Image (cartoon, helix red, strand yellow):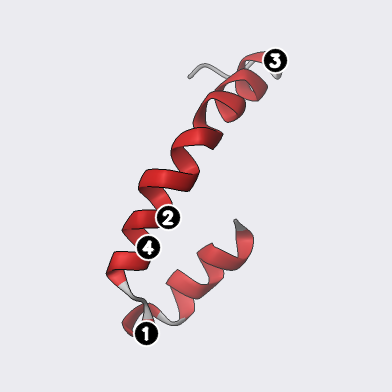
Amino acid sequence: MAAVRNRIAHAYFGIDDTILFTTVGEELTDLLPRMEALARKEGVSV
């Protein structure tokens, strides 16, 4: 995730929008429930 953030922040005009939105839609959707569970475990409201 850090590498993706760095790529977006520092090479904005070199990003392929299709790849980025496909990644968000397909890959991060599966990660969301795990992140929410971790946040609840740590006492962070989601």
Q: Is residue 20 above or below residue 43?
A: below
Callout in the foreground (2, 1): 2
Residue type, label 4: Leu
Residue holding disc 4: 20
* Residue toward you, 23 or 35: 23
First in residue order: circle 1 vs circle 3: 1
Residue type, label 1: Gly
Measure the alpha-carbon separation of dots 2 and 1: 16 Å
First in residue order: circle 3 vs circle 4: 4
Measure the alpha-carbon separation of dots 2 and 4: 5 Å
Image-based side of 12 in relation to 9, left or right = left
Q: Residues within 10 Å of mark 1 (few under 14, many from 20)?
A: few
Q: Which residue: 37% across, 66% down?
A: 19
| Image marks 2 and 4: residues in contact by CB distance under 8 Å | yes
First in residue order: circle 2 vs circle 1: 1
Give coordinates of residue 43: x percent, y percent.
65, 14
| Image marks 2 and 1: residues in contact by CB distance under 8 Å | no
Q: Residues within 10 Å of mark 3 (few under 14, many from 20)?
A: few
Q: Is residue 4 above or below residue 12?
A: above
Residue type, label 2: Thr
| Image marks 3 and 4: residues in contact by CB distance under 8 Å | no
Give coordinates of residue 46: x percent, y percent.
48, 19
First in residue order: circle 1 vs circle 4: 1
| Image marks 1 and 3: residues in contact by CB distance under 8 Å | no
- The numbered dot on residue 14 is 1
Measure the alpha-carbon separation of dots 1 and 4: 11 Å
- The numbered dot on residue 41 is 3
Residue type, label 3: Lys
Q: Quadrant of residue 44?
A: top right
Give coordinates of residue 16: x percent, y percent.
33, 75
Residue holding disc 2: 23
